[in-house]
């Protein structure tokens, strides 16, 4: 039997929660330090930059964090797009990064300028 390459996911399968790895770490990572004071960053330091709900997600130790409905609405816009497994690239990339991982890390600034780098297999 042939392996599945094209995956069509129904909107009902859109995730309702994010997985938070912090709940499964053996010990918490060291705190982020404020660059000016070199003391751990607190919610008051982050409040000018981020909404409080996002700050609370960052410091949460719960295993699952509910995905806000407006974010799920955005996911619904893209969920009808089928997912394709890049099976043909696996042999050429054996022992290397997962397919597309390098592209994911490509600088947004380079993409914004419209520069396209040669991307050999």
Image (cartoon, rainbow, N blue to C red):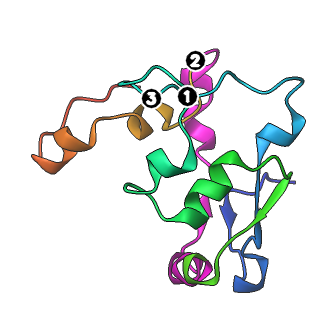
Q: For the residue labelled by badge 2, is the local secondary structure a helix, a strand or a loop?
A: loop
Q: Is residue 84 left or right of residue 14?
A: left
Residue closest to the eye, 97 or 41: 41
- Residue 96's label in the rendered image is 2
Quadrant into which the N terminus falls: bottom right
| Residue 87 location (% of width, % of height) | 63, 41
Q: Which residue range is magenta in the image?
A: 72-96
Spatial separation of the CA atoms under disc 1 and disc 3 = 7 Å
102 part of magenta stretch: no
Q: Residue at x 56, y 23 (%)?
A: 97
**Residue 6 in the figure: left or right of residue 39:** right
Q: Observer-nearest residue: 106 or 29? A: 29
Number of callouts: 3
User: What residue is at 35 percent from the left and 25 percent from the top?
Assistant: 36
Is residue 52 positioned above or below 108 on the image? Answer: below
Using the rendered view, name the quadrant where residue 104 is placed: top left
What residue did someone put label 3 on? 34
**Nearer the observer, 50 or 17:** 50
The numbered disc on residue 80 is none
- Check the image and report above or below for 31 versus 88: above
Q: Secondary structure at mark 1?
A: loop
Q: Position of residue 59 (x, y in %)?
A: 69, 46
Residue at (88% x, 36% y) in the render: 24
Element type at mark 3? loop
Would you identify the image quadrant in which residue 71 lies?
Answer: bottom right
Q: Horizontally, is 23 left or right of 48 in the view?
A: right
Nearer mark to the viewer, of 1 and 3: 3
């Amino acid at each position: 039997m042939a392996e599945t390459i094209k995956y069509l996911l129904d909107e009902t399968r859109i995730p309702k929660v994010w997985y938070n790895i912090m709940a499964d770490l053996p010990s918490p990572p060291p705190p982020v330090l404020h660059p000016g004071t070199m003391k751990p960053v607190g919610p008051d330091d982050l409040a000018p930059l981020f909404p409080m709900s996002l700050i609370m997600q960052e410091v949460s130790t719960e295993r699952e964090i509910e995905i806000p409905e407006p974010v799920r609405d955005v996911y619904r816009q893209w969920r009808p797009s089928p997912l394709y497994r890049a099976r043909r690239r696996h042999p050429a990339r054996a022992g290397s990064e997962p397919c597309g991982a390098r592209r994911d890390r490509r600088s947004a600034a380079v993409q914004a300028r419209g520069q396209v780098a040669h991307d050999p297999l």
